[in-house]
Image: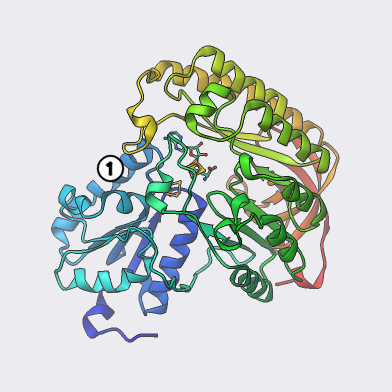
Amino acid sequence: MLFLGENMKKNNKFFVVTYGCQMNKHDSEKIIGLLLSQGYKRAETMEGADIIIFNTCCVRGSAEDRLFGNINSLKLIKDKRQDLIIAVGGCVAQKEGSKLQRKMSHVDVVFGTHNIASLPTLIKEAQKGKIACEVLKSPRDEIKALPVERDNSVRAWVNISTGCNNFCSYCIVPYVRGRETSRSFEDIVAEVKMLASEGFLEVTLLGQNVNSYGRDLYGEIRFAELLRQLNEIDGIERIRFTSSHPRDFNGDIVLALAECEKVCEHVHLPLQAGSDNVLKTMRRGYTKEGYLDLVKKIYEAVPNCSITTDIIVGFPGETEEDFLDTLDVVKQARFDNAFTFAYSPREGTRAFEMENQISKKVKMDNFKRLLEVQNKNSLKNNLVLMEKELEVLVESPSKKKADVLTGRTRTNKVVNFPGPHSLINRLARVKIKEVRSWSLNGELKEVCERESICRL
Ligand code: SAH
Ligand code: SF4
Ligand code: F3S
């Protein structure tokens, strides 16, 4: 651990605000781990912090607007407290670079998605009154393994790749996260073994397109082999992964999903749109039929698999007929959940320049129509679970009632049931007694008493 100077000892409390996807949440764990390892301390609230760090997302305009609103609201505080450091990292920082400090003069530090390791140095520069900004276009050759302060003691995120090469025409991610770069097999296996030895029960493998994992390293897709290797690691009980790209979800992966007992029965399989025309303009690389065929293969291999998806409504030029194709896929695929987004034009992407932008009203109407169909799907799928006993990894007390616990099934469904707090972070068997579209209620049948999961 480095020792801080007298001055920094006084101004060393930080607070991190995170927006965006799981990748960003995991990056925040690295930011926190790195700063703690350098002697900084966590502040309990933003008000109590000397350094406020925003880890940002720009996938849709709404996320960015919210961020700018929040940073602007700190201007008055900064006027009164000149020694307060405001740092902006993540995808907005990568996109805007030093422009951000020109737009908002009270931002002291800007660090890109490839520059987390430089944050302590940048903070020190800012504390000396210098303008601190570092935004690299691509990762440095030697990517340093950063210390990680995990948010949870049983569930852990593990990066298997960063960046994306797909350039879907609406999406800004490849511009802010760079090209797809896979981590080595050995590094990933070593991290998961380490997590198992520390008592973690669940890992979620992260990548913008996990299914193409290894293409840049081994010249062919190796995701299925990775799943099989990780499945052998003692102590890990659940393996999840996100996101999958339907184009790269090959037969080997379907087989690994079926055969690896620790790989959970849940696939997040972004559809984006159901019409072939829209899929083509989105540059997704599959057709409606191809997508439905993959869904069929997954259900055949893993009959109780839960499939969730992302859908964009109102892509430029989307007609009523196109939208009906999306609704048709939603019905046929029987998704357990669909995250629906109104198309948001992102400058720099191909779709930004397209004509035939769809009105806000049509986007909102279609959004509602989609939600109605999906609600029915979800409820129908959950009704099948009545009176079934399911394995639940208990996460926390429920937000509504202190004596009710909440956790997730292997299929990633939320289950609430009455039980003591001592069950948190353990696996339990719960009988489902009531179902809703978005959650299940049940009663405790049994606590799983396996050695590895008795961590109290
Ligand atoms: N790599 C992942 C996640 C990408 S971002 C994947 O391909 O699945 C998460 C979701 O945001 C996407 O799946 C997409 O549905 C949505 N999204 C991306 N760009 C968008 C845009 N410009 N407008 C609206 N939604 C968008
Ligand atoms: Fe964006 Fe497409 Fe890459 Fe996902 S696969 S991050 S939607 S470009
Ligand atoms: Fe957002 Fe960046 Fe993730 S744009 S969705 S935080 S990769």
Horizontal arrangement in the rendering, residue 201 relative to residue 170 (left or right): right
**Residue that carries the numbered disc 1 in the rendered image:** 69
* Vertical relation: 374 (above or below) 445: above
The image quadrant of residue 233 is bottom right
Amino acid type of the residue that numbered disc 1 sits on in the rendered structure: Gly
Mark 1 neighbour class, 10 Å CA radius: few under 14, some 14 to 19, many 20 or more? few
Q: Nearer the viewer, residue 406 or 295?
A: 295
Q: Residue at x 52, y 13 (%)?
A: 320
- Label 1 beta carbon within 8 A of ligand 3: no
Q: Looking at the figure, which quarter contains the C terminus?
A: bottom right
* Vertical relation: 376 (above or below) 172: above
The colour scheme is: rainbow
Q: How many marks?
A: 1
Residue ranking furthest to the front: 219
The image quadrant of residue 159 is bottom right
What x and y, as percent, mark residue 73? 24, 47
Q: Looking at the figure, which quarter contains the N terminus?
A: bottom left
What x and y, as percent, mark residue 22? 51, 52
* Vertical relation: 115 (above or below) 193: above
What x and y, as percent, mark residue 355? 35, 20
Q: Residue at x 32, y 53 (%)?
A: 94
The image quadrant of residue 371 is top right
- Quick check: can you spot residue 438? yes
What x and y, as percent, mark residue 199? 68, 72
Horizontal arrangement in the rendering, residue 237 relative to residue 65 (left or right): right
* Tag 1 secondary structure: helix
Q: Residue at x 77, y 33 (%)?
A: 296
- Quick check: can you spot residue 439? no
